[in-house]
Image (cartoon, grey):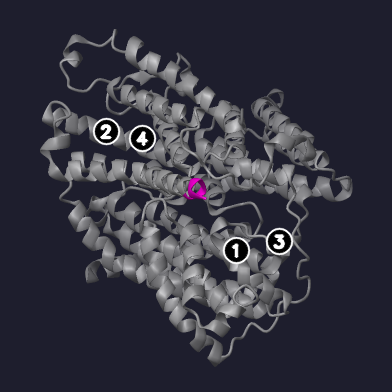
Amino acid sequence: MALDRWIALVLVGICLAYGYAAWFTMDGGLAPFMKRNPIWPSTFPKVLSVLGLIAALIILFGLEKSEVSEPDIDYRRLGDYHLGQALLLLGLMVAYALCLRPLGFLFSTTAFLILGSVILGERKWFVMVPVSVFATLVVWYLVQQVLGIYLRPLPGFFGG
Amino acid sequence: MLEGLLIGLQTAFSLQNLLMVIGGCLIGTFIGMLPGLGPMSIIAIMIPVAISMGDPSAALILLAGVYYGAIFGGSTSSILLNAPGVAGTVASSFDGYPMAKQGKAGKALTIAAIASFAGGSIGALLLMVFAPALSSVALLFHSAEYFALMVVGLSAIAAFAGTGQVAKALMMTILGLIMATVGEGALFNLPRFTMGIMDLQSGFGFITLAMAMFALPEALFLVLKPKTPQDSQDGEIKDLRITCAEARAIAPVIGRQSLQGFFIGVLPGAGATIASFLGYAVERNIATKEEQEEFGKGSIKGLAAPETANNAACTGSFVPLLTLGIPGSGTTAILLGALIALNVTPGPRLMLDEPQIFWAVIMSMFIGNLVLLILNLPLIPYIAKVLSIPRNYLIPFILFFTLMGAYIGQNNATELLLLVAFGICATALRFADFPLAPLLIGFILGGMLEDNFARSMQLYDGIGFIWERPMTLGLLVIAALLVVLPSYRARRARLRAQGVADGD
C-alpha cells in the first residue's frame, strides 16, 4: 500500500476519534439553556468529522485516480538520502527545546548551531565556533533589547 | 478614494514605514534567493518580528515587502543558478538560465526586475480600482453569505490543486478546520478537544503550525537531498543595460501579463505559480514563428512573461484578503494570521474602519516595487554572494530561526516540541504528495467559518438560512460544483480514453 493510503488510514482514525468525541462525549455536560440553542459547541465538529471521514475514505480506497507525479524525494528509497543527518538534526531540535529553559539561551543556541554544523559534516572549528557565538549574541541582543522579549540568557543555577 | 490615497501616502511615507519597506524587500530578496526557502517560510519566520512591532500598518508593510522581495530573490536564483527558491519563479528559469549561460546574466536580471516592477505596479493600480468596488459589494453580505463565501474559497483551493489531488487537498482543508476547533473558542467559552492538556487550552499556535508546515519540511528536504545547482555563473554580473529594441519587444508582453496575472492572482487557490506558467504558455503561443523558436533558449519575452505574471498575481492575491478577509493562498493566509494577531480583521470593514492600513499597504506596494528596481537591482551582484554560503552553516541557521519563531510567538518550550512533531508529520504528508497550504488556510479560516455558521444558525434558528437566502444557496452550489467538476471531468476523459482503446 502506498504511503498516501497509509496516511489516509491514519486520518480515518483521527476523524473517527474526533467524531466519537464530537458525537458522544460533548453534549452530555451541556447546560440545559444551551440545549435550546440551534447550534451547540459540537455542531460544527460533527459536520467536520463526517466530511473528513468521507474525504479520507476516498483517498484510502483510491476512488480518485491521480497521475503519478515525479516526487522531489522518493520516500521508498529514503536510505539513499542523508536520512541520518536529518534524524540527528531533528533530535538536536528536541534537545534544544528541552535545554532552552534550564541551560539558558546563550549556551543552548551556541551549542545548537555548532552541533548542527558538525552533524552536516563541517569540521572547520575556527570558523564555526566564532560564527555561532557571534550569531547567538546578535540574535539575543535583537530579541531581548530591540523586540523586548525576555530570553533567559544564562543557566538557571547562575541566577540568569 | 482621494482622501484614502492621501492617508495612505502619509502613513506609507513615514520614516518608519519607509524603512520597513526597504528592510522587508532586502530581507526578502536575501532569503528568497536561498534555494528551498519559499515566501511562506520567510514570512512565517518574520511574523514574530512584525507582531512585536505592534503597529499593524508597519507590520503588514514589512511582510508585504518581504513577500515581493522573496519573489524577486527567487527569480535571481532561477536565473543565475537554475535553482528556483520559490515555485512561482520556476518558469523564469526556462529562459533566464539560458540567458545567464550565454553571459547575459546582467541583462536577464534587468529584464526580470523591470518586468516585476511593471507587473507589481500595474497590479497595485488594479487593486486600487477593484478592491473598493468589491468591498462595497461585500458590505451587503450577511454572516450566512460570509460562511458560504468561505466555503467557496476553501473548495476553490481544493479544486485548483490539480488532477487527482482534489480529495487530498480537501482532506487537508478539513484537517486544518478540525485543528482549528481545538482549544477554547470565542463562541462558547468552552475548551474543546484539549484532552485535558493545559497547553492546548488556547489552541494550536498559528506561527508554530506555519513553521512546521513550510519552513521545517523545506529545511529537512534540503538536508535529505542537497540541491546541486547546475554549473553556477561565478563570473561577474555585468552589463545590466537593455536596448530600446528589447524594451519595445517586451512592453506588450508586460502589459498583457500584468492583467492576466492579476486576475489569476485574485482567484483563490490559483497564485503566482499558476500565473507564471500560464503567462509563459500564452506568450509562447501568440509569439511569431521565429520567436517561438527562441523560447527556452534565452528569449527575453519568455523571461518577461512569467516575471510580470507572478508579481501581478502576488498583488492580485491581496484583493480577496483585503476586501473579504479570505486568503486565497498560503502566503496570504499567513498574512491574515499575522493581522488577526495584531487585532485587525481584514474584510470589507477594513477600508471604512482603518483606511490608513488599507491604503498604506497599497502605497507601500508601489514603494516596494520601486525599491526592488532601483535599490535591489544594483545590489544584486553583492546579494548574490549569499548563494555561496555553505549549506553546513545555512541549514542550522534556518532550523534555529524556525525554532525561534515558534518560541518568540508563544514563549513556551512545549511549543518547540509541537513544532518538531508537526514538522515530521508535515514532511511525511509532503512525501505522500498531500498539499500543505490548504491545511494552513483551513486552520486560519476555521474560527471565522464556525463563527459565521453559528451566527446564521442562530439568526434563522436552524440551517434554514441555506435555502432562505438565495445568494448563500448560489455560493454553496458553486462550491459543490468546484469540488465535483474536476473529478467528473477527469473521469469522463478517462472513460473516453478507455473507449478509444476498446474500439481499437
Chain letter belonging to callout 4: B
- B355 to the left or right of A118: left
Can you tell which of label 4 and label 3 is closer to the viewer?
4
Can you tell which of label 2 and label 3 is closer to the viewer?
2
Q: Is residue B92 above or below residue B177?
A: below
The first of marks 4 and 3 along the sequence is 3
**The N terminus of chain B - image quarter:** bottom left
Whether residue B364 appears in this view of the structure is no
Q: CA distance from mark 4 to mark 3?
A: 39 Å
**Residue shown at the point (59%, 75%) measured from the top left:** B295
Amino acid identity at mark 3? Val
User: Which labelled disc corresponds to residue B386?
Assistant: 3
Amino acid identity at mark 2? Asp
Residue most extreme to the top = A28
- Label 1 neighbour load within 10 Å: few <14, some 14-19, many 20+: many
The first of marks 4 and 2 along the sequence is 4
Amino acid identity at mark 4? Gly
Q: Is residue B500 above or below residue B311?
A: above
Which residue bears the numbered disc 4? B446
| Dominant secondary structure, magenta | helix
Q: Secondary structure at mark 4?
A: helix
Chain letter belonging to callout 1: B
